[in-house]
């Protein structure tokens, strides 16, 4: 049996990242600046993306959430 | 010349390898050592999402528009966490109903409607065929890039076209060989899936290799490329997303979120080929990771290409190939070319299999059935009549047909369009299925009419806004429609449709089509009445998780944690004995070291415990540590499985046993909490389990009889089977009641309070039992005061109370000359309801007891005089939850009068539930 | 030895299954729905074996068994309790009143029949 909190947590991740990756929050990073030569928007999108994958991975692979 | 042979030889070798891998996958599956049965292969097979569009087109799009191409991958990433809700439900439904395609799915949901199935099939075929054809185009185009022209330019293209034809033929062979092995379309295609997973891995490695080469071989890392690009104003603008594109960004993400589970090929790999729901859990993060990795180098390659080929006419769609070729990296060029080939072929193979099943099952078979005018023959009966061969062959012909059409489309039309545009048009087409699918699994109210309306409107808008312009571009339609609108009405131009110019053409098509589609779906559903078949299917689809769950796993499969079992045993046997008992059992049966306890171990523990606390209590306790299965009925399932006739009973029992498990768990929880407070509750639990033993006893006895006496007469068999079913029902009722009661007792019950007309509730209830009343010749008198104010109540719960009281009256009224009187009137601001029968009445000493469920005095051994079960207990709880009162007045031999009062709405200002 | 068996239970479905099994094994079957009826039939038919539920209306199974074992002409009747009451004290009480066997529900029809056959010898 999956953990009962799994579903609401997954849904929360969806909502948070949907907002992070759309207007208006997206516009915060959508400015012409670079970091280490790489445009800020690219950092932001790929970073958020990776963060989301990481959170999903941690949530779904953690032992107590599998049971 | 050598490069030419390298490329052609490489392509041939690659395709041969693909056949080999698929063959290996099939062989392993046949020997029961499936390669596909793991979450990694599953996640990789989902990456069939990444086609030549991703492989070549993303770079092209990034080179022109910057980050916008990412919406196609961010959409599925955002959708991934929701898979746990959406996709898991779809998978469960498809497994339970043996559904193999989206068209089946939608038609099954809305009452197995043929028309719907064929419309969905047409949507998918029209939507996806162009998409397949651009994969062929990508293969031909990539060939013409990597091979130096052998002669005049025209020759080369002709030659590449021919090559595309050869590839088409090879793919048709592959698809037929590995996509149509079994007549039963629910059979998984393990060979195909293995090959697809390999292709996904290959295209990822190839793309990352070229990405790494461009980023670190040609340039000096990410920072270097972007820094150089930043010095050129033409490229610097791509560093940000123009503000006007925020809306496009949003709608493109939305359409990708839908496409990831609605594209026929995604449905095929994610749902149909799914071996185990649990694989979904890992795919939810692995698949987004795949998308992340394959996109990581798109921007560097795009900018690298534009910097490198500034001023030259190199198509950005081909940068991936052109850059390593420019630097003479033959090996890398070959690998990149093969990666593109793998991206294109995997998409073609899976899409073709999915479409061919759809066309066959939803267009050809119905037509064939109709023409052979065998209306009464079901598809199952057909399959038995050796039409299997015929079906297989027709599926194969359909595969060839689809691929041929795709090739023709490529030669005639799609040469003009880019990878991305055609792909997006497909996405929007399949997104039209979203209201029907999502509404179908979450909303019981969705109807066939609503779906037909929604699909037609959505598909119509899709066709008008996205397809008409391509027809015009192909020169088949006058361009006036683009400028002047349909019939000269400027509002009816494909773009801007209805004057909305805030988006680009594709997002605006997404917006309008989904808006009208879902609007029509909901309105149509609300305004039409579903048929019985639709209602049944709606119930099954929406409530699939409450009905059943797949029972996989058997002997040797872990069903509980060993530590849990051991802890449980230790509580009763002591730690040393428990450890020793389990270890010796496992040694005796040569079980491998594991933290899991399998069926046998758990059963052994149950037997050990039964010696201490009796088998029933042992069962309840053991069930509490078992994860998926229950044990008591397990032997039954096996017996029942043996006979086809018993399948029905089996399903019912399975359901019961899962509910029983739940009850067991809840009982235990209730027990733990209550022990501290009230010792009496112990008695309750033992009584409930006691009550359950009778049906279980009968079920077991009859099942054993059925197994031990195979030569029973049909009549006897039927009698015994119906007894099993009846007893299973009895258990179900008991379980429902216990769960209800538990909810009330724990205060978890919530009520939907609204003003309720009590007279309607009473009349509805009487309607539902009128048949019984008539059959038993019971005289019924109903006196309801005409000006009864409404009461604040939960209508369903109130119906339950009235039904309980009326059923009791029917059960206990005089057998020969029964009479029941029901009256209702307002008194002291309360609405009062009386249900009076002329039965034996309730003796004073039992009056309190009948409301206490099957509580019994300690050590009681004779049965209570009046009704068992929990009906009155629950009714009393419900009424008290409504701040009312329920009681009985009776004199022995004078019948019983059950009454309850509820506050009327005017007197019930503060209801705080 | 006669092959009469008296089934005492108020659950129709259980009676139905026992009736079938006993007849299949060559017993002559009598059925009682409560303790009172059981004693009436027992006095009249003097069954070899009695399959007895504990929880019944009017007179419970323990009393029936105690009565049988106390009356000289019925004391030879073999009594098998078939009861949902499975606590140790219930089982001990069954044997205390003179039962030959105490089985708890749910039971295996196979072992029940084996035991009945043995007791009927």
Image: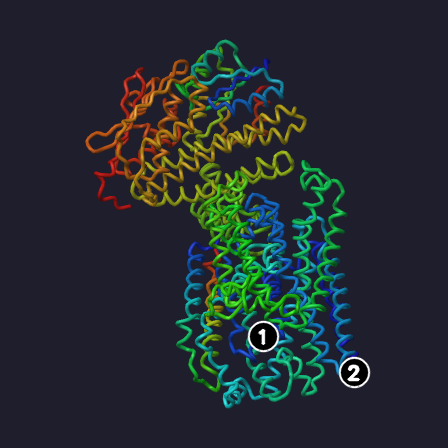
Characterize the local packing of mark 1: few (<14), some (14-19) or many (20 or more) Cα atoms within 10 angstroms. Answer: many
Q: Residue furthest front?
A: B488
Which is closer to the viewer, label 1 or label 2? Answer: 2
Q: Earlier in the sequence, mark 1 or mark 2?
A: 1
Name the residue beneath numbered marker 2. B152
Q: Quadrant of the N terminus of chain B?
A: bottom right
Q: Is residue B789 left or right of residue B256?
A: left
Q: Is residue B553 visible?
A: no
Name the residue beneath numbered marker 1. B58
Rendering quarter of residue C56: top left
**Residue B680 in picture, x, y percent from top left:** 32, 36
Residue closest to the eye, B600 or B269:
B269
**Residue B692 in picture, x, y percent from top left:** 46, 33
Residue closest to the eye, C21 or B233:
B233
- Residue A12, compared with residue B203, is above or below; it is above
Q: Is residue B294 visible?
A: yes
* Secondary element at tag 2: loop
Characterize the local packing of mark 2: few (<14), some (14-19) or many (20 or more) Cα atoms within 10 angstroms. Answer: few
* Secondary element at tag 1: helix
Residue closest to the eye, B34 or B583:
B34
- Residue at 43% across, 84% down: A33
**Residue B894 in picture, x, y percent from top left:** 30, 16
Name the disc covering residue B659, or none: none
Rendering quarter of residue B163: bottom right
- Residue at 33% across, 33% down: B875
Q: Residue furthest left?
A: B828
**Are the residues under marks 1 and 2 on the same chain?**
yes
**Residue B118 in picture, x, y percent from top left:** 63, 50
Rounded to the nearest whole Å, what is the CA distance between mark 1 and mark 2?
30 Å
The chain identifier of the residue carrying mark 1 reads B
The chain identifier of the residue carrying mark 2 reads B
Residue closest to the eye, B12 or B441:
B441
């Amino acid at each position: 049996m999956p953990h009962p909190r799994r579903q609401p947590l997954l849904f929360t991740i969806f909502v948070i990242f949907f907002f992070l990756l759309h207007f208006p929050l997206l516009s915060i990073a959508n400015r012409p600046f670079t970091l280490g030569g790489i445009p800020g928007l690219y950092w932001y999108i790929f970073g958020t993306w990776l963060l989301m994958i990481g959170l999903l991975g941690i949530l779904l692979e953690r032992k107590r959430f599998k049971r | 010349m050598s490069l030419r042979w390298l490329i052609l030889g490489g392509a041939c070798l690659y395709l041969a390898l693909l056949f080999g891998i698929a063959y290996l996958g099939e062989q392993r599956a046949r020997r029961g050592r499936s390669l596909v049965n793991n979450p990694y292969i599953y996640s990789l097979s989902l990456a069939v999402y990444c086609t030549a569009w991703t492989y070549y087109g993303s770079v092209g799009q990034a080179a022109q528009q910057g980050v916008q191409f990412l919406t196609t991958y961010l959409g599925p990433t955002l959708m991934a966490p929701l898979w746990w809700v959406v996709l898991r439900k779809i998978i469960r439904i498809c497994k339970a109903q043996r559904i193999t395609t989206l068209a089946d799915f939608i038609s099954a949901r809305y009452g197995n409607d043929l028309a719907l199935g064929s419309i969905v099939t047409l949507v998918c075929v029209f939507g996806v065929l162009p998409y397949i054809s651009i994969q062929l185009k990508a293969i031909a185009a990539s060939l013409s890039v990597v091979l130096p022209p052998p002669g005049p330019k025209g020759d080369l293209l002709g030659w590449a076209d021919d090559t595309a034809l050869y590839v088409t033929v090879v793919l048709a062979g592959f698809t037929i060989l590995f996509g149509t092995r079994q007549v039963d379309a629910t059979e998984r295609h393990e060979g195909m899936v293995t090959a697809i997973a390999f292709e996904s891995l290959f295209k990822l490695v190839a793309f990352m290799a070229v990405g790494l080469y461009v980023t670190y071989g040609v340039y000096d890392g990410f920072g270097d490329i972007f820094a150089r690009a930043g010095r050129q104003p033409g490229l610097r603008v791509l560093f940000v997303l123009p503000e006007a594109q925020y809306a496009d960004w949003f709608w493109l993400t939305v359409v990708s979120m839908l496409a990831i589970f609605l594209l026929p090929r995604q449905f095929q790999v994610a749902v149909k080929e799914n071996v185990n729901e649990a694989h979904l859990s890992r795919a939810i993060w692995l698949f987004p990771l795949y998308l992340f990795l394959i996109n990581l180098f798109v921007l560097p390659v795009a900018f690298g290409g534009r910097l490198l080929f500034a001023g030259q006419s190199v198509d950005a769609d081909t940068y991936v190939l052109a850059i390593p070729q420019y630097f003479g990296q033959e090996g890398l060029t070959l690998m990149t070319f093969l990666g593109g080939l793998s991206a294109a072929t995997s998409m073609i193979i899976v899409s073709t299999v999915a479409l061919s099943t759809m066309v066959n099952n939803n267009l050809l078979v119905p037509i064939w059935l109709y023409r052979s005018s065998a209306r009464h023959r079901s598809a199952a009966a057909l399959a038995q009549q050796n039409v299997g061969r015929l079906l297989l062959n027709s599926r194969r012909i359909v595969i060839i047909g689809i691929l041929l059409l795709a090739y023709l489309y490529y030669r005639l039309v799609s040469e003009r369009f880019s990878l991305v545009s055609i792909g997006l048009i497909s996405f929007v087409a399949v997104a039209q299925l979203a209201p029907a699918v999502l509404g179908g699994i979450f909303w019981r109210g969705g109807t066939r009419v609503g779906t037909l309306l929604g699909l037609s409107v959505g598909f119509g808008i899709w066709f008008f806004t996205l397809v008409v312009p391509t027809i015009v571009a192909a020169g088949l339609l006058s361009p006036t429609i683009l400028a002047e609108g349909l019939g000269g009405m400027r509002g009816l131009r494909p773009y801007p449709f209805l004057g909305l110019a805030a988006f680009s053409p594709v997002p605006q098509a997404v917006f309008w089509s989904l808006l009208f589609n879902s609007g029509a779906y909901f309105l149509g559903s609300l305004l039409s009445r579903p048929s019985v078949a639709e209602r049944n299917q709606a119930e099954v689809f929406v409530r699939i998780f409450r009905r059943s769950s797949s029972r996989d796993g058997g002997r040797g499969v872990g069903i509980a944690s060993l530590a849990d079992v051991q802890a449980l045993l230790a509580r009763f046997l002591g730690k040393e004995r428990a450890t020793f008992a389990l270890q010796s059992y496992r040694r005796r049966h040569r079980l491998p070291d594991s933290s899991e306890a399998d069926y046998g171990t758990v059963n052994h523990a149950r037997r050990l415990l039964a010696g201490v606390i009796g088998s029933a209590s042992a069962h309840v306790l053991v069930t509490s540590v078992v994860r998926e299965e229950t044990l008591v009925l397990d032997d039954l399932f096996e017996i029942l499985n043996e006979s086809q006739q018993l399948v029905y009973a089996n399903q019912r029992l399975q359901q019961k046993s899962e509910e029983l498990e739940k009850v067991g768990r809840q009982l235990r929880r209730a027990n733990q909490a209550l022990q501290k407070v009230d010792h009496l509750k112990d008695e309750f639990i033992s009584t409930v389990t006691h009550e359950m033993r009778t049906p279980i006893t009968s079920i077991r006895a009859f099942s054993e009889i059925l197994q031990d006496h195979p030569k029973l007469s049909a009549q006897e068999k039927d009698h015994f089977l119906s007894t099993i079913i009846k007893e299973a029902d009895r258990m179900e009722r008991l379980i429902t009641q216990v769960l209800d009661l538990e909810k009330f007792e724990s205060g978890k019950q919530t009520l939907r309070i609204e003003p309720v007309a009590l007279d309607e509730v009473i009349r509805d209830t009487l309607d539902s039992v009128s048949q019984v009343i008539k059959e038993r010749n019971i005289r019924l008198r109903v006196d309801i005061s005409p000006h009864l104010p409404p009461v604040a109540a939960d209508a369903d719960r109130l119906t339950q109370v009235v039904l309980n009281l009326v059923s009791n009256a029917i059960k206990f009224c005089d057998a020969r000359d029964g009479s029941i009187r029901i009256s209702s009137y307002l008194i002291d601001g309360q609405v009062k309801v009386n249900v009076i029968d002329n039965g034996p009445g309730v003796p004073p000493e039992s009056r309190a007891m009948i409301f206490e469920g099957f509580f019994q005095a300690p050590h009681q051994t004779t049965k209570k005089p009046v009704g068992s079960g929990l009906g009155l207990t629950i009714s009393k709880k419900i009424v008290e939850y409504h701040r009312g009162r329920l009681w009985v007045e009776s004199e022995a031999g004078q019948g019983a009068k059950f009454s309850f009062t509820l506050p009327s709405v005017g007197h019930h200002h503060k209801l705080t539930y | 030895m006669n092959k009469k068996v008296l089934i005492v239970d108020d659950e129709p479905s259980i009676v139905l299954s026992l009736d079938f099994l006993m007849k299949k094994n060559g017993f002559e079957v009598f059925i009682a729905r409560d303790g009172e009826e059981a004693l009436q039939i027992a006095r009249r038919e003097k069954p070899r074996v009695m399959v007895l539920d504990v929880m019944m209306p009017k007179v419970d199974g323990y009393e029936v068994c105690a009565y049988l074992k106390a009356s000289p002409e019925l004391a030879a009747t073999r009594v098998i309790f078939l009861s949902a009451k499975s606590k140790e004290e219930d089982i001990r009480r069954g044997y205390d009143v003179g039962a030959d066997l105490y089985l708890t529900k749910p039971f295996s029809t196979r072992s029940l029949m084996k035991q009945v056959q043995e007791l009927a010898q």
